[in-house]
Image (cartoon, grey):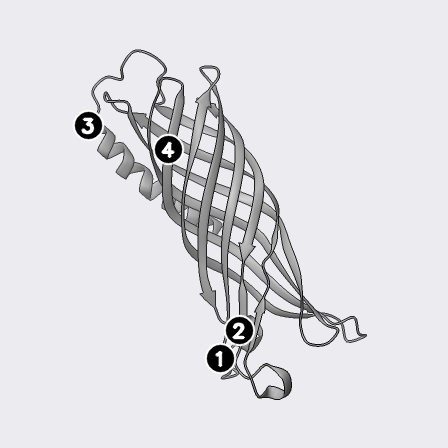
Amino acid sequence: MKTILLATILALAPVGMACAADISETSPAGYDWSGLYAGADVGYVAGKSNLFIAGGGIGGTSDLNASLDPDGFIGGIHIGFNQEMANRFVLGAEADIAYNNVDGLTNFGGSALMKSEIKWSGSARLRAGYAFDRTLPFITAGVAAAKYEATIITATPSGDIMVHDETHTGWTVGAGIEHAFTDRWIARAEYRYSSFGSKELSLAEGLGTATSVDLQTHDLRVGLSYKF
């Protein structure tokens, strides 16, 4: 999946560059946002997830709906390319990958607990903004993926039970602001909403039982980039 994300950004980049070539002539005097950049970011993630098992309620007479809602901190890297137009509009493409310390615990039938955990996440996105010299507000949207796990913690000799271990794919959209405090170093702050879709529980594959687990996240991130 990480390979797919990188391949997607390589596919998206020519689109932004082609648009720039059609519109751009010469950037106005001042800071020029055009060029390749890379950097690192950290942030906080608040997740929303629901686990559904048909007939999984008490006595098997009702359905089970469990809210998992993992949250925590992330850190990762990003790489992208911008092209500034003569009218100060900036088009670009960016990819990112992050390690996630994002998890949650919820009661799951009696004394058992369900642990949910986002292991990693990433995206490949297009970006658009308007440059106020060294300050760039922007919006962004694209594809996203996350590795999501759910485990029943039984506290018994039989051990824990892994019920879900899948890579979810979906979409992400967000907005942020960047500021170039030198010609090379750029600081950023960004909010993103990501919907990673719904999948059948890994444990229930082939059993004929209706199950699902979905995942959405709200990310707040800050970062630092170096423009080449």
Q: Nearer the viewer, mark 2 or mark 1?
A: 2
Report helix, strand or loop for mark 4: strand
Q: How many marks?
A: 4
Who's the residue at 38% across and 26% down the image?
136
**Which disc is residue 138 wearing?**
4
Marks 2/1 in contact by CB < 8 Å: the verdict is yes
| Amino acid tagged 3 | Ile
Measure the alpha-carbon separation of dots 1 and 3.
51 Å
Q: Nearer the viewer, mark 3 or mark 2?
A: 2
Q: Nearer the N terminus, badge 1 or badge 4?
A: 4
Q: Nearer the N terminus, badge 2 or badge 1?
A: 2
Q: Nearer the viewer, mark 1 or mark 4?
A: 4
Measure the alpha-carbon separation of dots 2 and 4.
37 Å
Q: From the viewer's perspective, is residue 4 above or below residue 92?
A: below
Residue under pointer 1: 210
| Amino acid tagged 1 | Ala
| Amino acid tagged 4 | Phe
**In this view of the protein, which residue sits in the foreground, 106 or 79?**
106
Marks 3/2 in contact by CB < 8 Å: the verdict is no
Q: Nearer the N terminus, badge 4 or badge 3?
A: 3
Q: Nearer the N terminus, badge 1 or badge 3?
A: 3
- Indicate the position of residue 36 as horizontal and vertical percent values: 40, 27
Who's the residue at 32% across and 42% down the image?
12
Measure the alpha-carbon separation of dots 4 and 3.
18 Å
**In this view of the protein, which residue sits in the foreground, 49 or 168?**
49
**Which disc is residue 23 wearing?**
3
